[in-house]
Amino acid sequence: MSEDALARVRDAVDAAYRSESRRVLATLIRLLGDFDLAEEAMHQAFTAALEQWERDGVPENARAWLVTTGRFKAIDRIRRRTRFDAQANELAERLDAEARDAEQTEHEGLEDDRLRLIFTCCHPSLPPDAQMALTLREVCGLTTEEIARAFLTAPSTLAQRIVRAKNKIRVARIPYDVPGRGELPDRLDTVLRVVYLVFNEGYAASSGESLTRHDLSGEAIRLGRLLLELMPEEPEVMGLVALMLLHESRRAARTSPDGDIVLLDDQDRSRWDTRQIMEGTALVDRSLATRRIGPYTLQAAIAAAHARARTATATDWAQIASLYDVLLRVDPSPVVALNRAAAVAMRDGPAAGLALIDEILASGELADYHLAHSARAELCRRLGRTAEARAAYARALALARLEPERRFLERRLAALDE
Amino acid sequence: MLYLCLVYLEEKKLNAVPKHEYDALVAEHLAYHDELRRSGHFVVAEGLEPVSTATTVRVRNGRVSTTDGPFAETKEQLGGFFLVRARDLNDALEVAIGIPAARLGCVEVRPINDLGKTELGLRG
């Protein structure tokens, strides 16, 4: 074979890996009933592809070829590994018989396998950090090292988390299934929470120097799009993808070249990504039209209201405040109440907003949340209550952990003296 | 596959339940046993006497130590158990959710270690 032809086969295998490896893995897990076995089988299938596609040509349906090859490789492996173990032999026999029976029909409903994989990785009986790690690894195909780096965790810690999760899936027998209609809303909530946590981890790292870790946000958006493709009628899936796109659209504008925070009001709106805004707002509208409105859609609608304003002063604060009213009813939390207070301050003036914030702080909630104190400081400043503003900024500064946030608060404190 | 559903309750709370409510709860449990028998989940289920009746033993280097009370002092105590046969964890969780005492306390669902008696894997 010529060098050129060889390179073409390599490219074909690479391309198949990029586009098909996650689908192939998802199906192999269903067929083999074991994550580790399926992962190994998938890698063996791609290795086999390098040799055989060179000899026999690239198959028409690469995915089907990879699934079938991986499946038989796994069966061979079980046989070899356990020649003297009657029980494992039985397993190999059964997998083999199933494989032969199913060859005609097994490539139907494969999209369901990716959903099965997502719902299994995000099963509520797994701890949240394991749900995230497992999803990034199995669904997105990130390596353990990549995930560890993104979460600022030691690779060994992360690897252990994944091993424990896989072990629990196997031992407690967490089913490889898409939940039925009755369970779906709760289970989908868990999946959406995992995706959004991954996004936020990338959007605003919870500690450390860097404010954005783009890779994770990009991965979360890809995951969201996959969910949208697999569950095109779920309003909250639309809402979450919209919310992520609308946040992401401001990425270039939300930090200065020195890595400092630029507030929404001060952002150069010409640097917002219009393509993402258009896609995001269209999704919000579609979700709102279903009349089954959940918290992600409401948050996305708020982000869309900001995105539609050409300038900060053109922002429709009345609309935003009433969206927060609904959000607070649907998904009450002190952070939502705080954001609502900020919107009310813009609609009805700083005194009205400050009264609400003081109420929240008086309830003891958010007492250690730096953004509550910096919001209070900002409203005090606008009301000319400088001493109170200074105290609140100082409190926020004592609580803030991110370097850019600390620098921002220091600047605000200094500006009070000017 | 077998799962043990461990029912934890605050004994203090349970003792405070009025007699007629307590009787209703017991009746509800017995009815649930029947329901699980019909669905094929039931293996065995029992309630336990209070922890004040518990004795804990240990054997160390061949010496026995016997102490009064439960193994661990906790806010909620083991009050009963259901051993059930279920297709998978989701099926077992459904059973656990249906246990009437889950409304008062909580239910821990633990797969039974089959000591390698059945095959590995997730299949149902």
Image (cartoon, coloured by chain):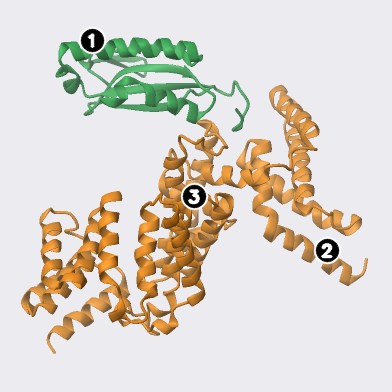
Residue placed under numbered mark 3 in the picture:
A234
Going by the numbered disc 1, the residue's amino acid type is Asp
**Secondary element type, mark 3:** loop
Going by the numbered disc 2, the residue's amino acid type is Val
Q: Do the residues labelled 1 and 3 touch (CB within 8 Å)?
A: no
Residue placed under numbered mark 1 in the picture:
B23
User: How far apart, in angstroms, are the residues tagged by discs 2 and 1?
Assistant: 74 Å
User: How far apart, in angstroms, are the residues tagged by discs 2 and 3?
Assistant: 40 Å
Letter of the green chain: B
> For chain A, what colour was chosen?
orange
Q: Do the residues labelled 2 and 3 touch (CB within 8 Å)?
A: no
Same-chain status of marks 2 and 3: yes
Residue placed under numbered mark 2 in the picture:
A9
Upstream in sequence: badge 2 or badge 3 = 2
Q: How many marks?
A: 3
- The quadrant of the picture occupied by the C terminus of chain A is bottom left
Q: How crowded is mark 2: few (under 14 residues within 10 Å), some or many (20 or more)?
A: many
Same-chain status of marks 2 and 1: no
The answer to whether residue B65 is visible is: yes
Single out the mark in the foreground, 2 or 3: 3
Q: Who is closer to the viewer here, A262 or A173?
A: A262
Taking the spot 20% from the left edge, 71% from the top edge, the residue there is A347
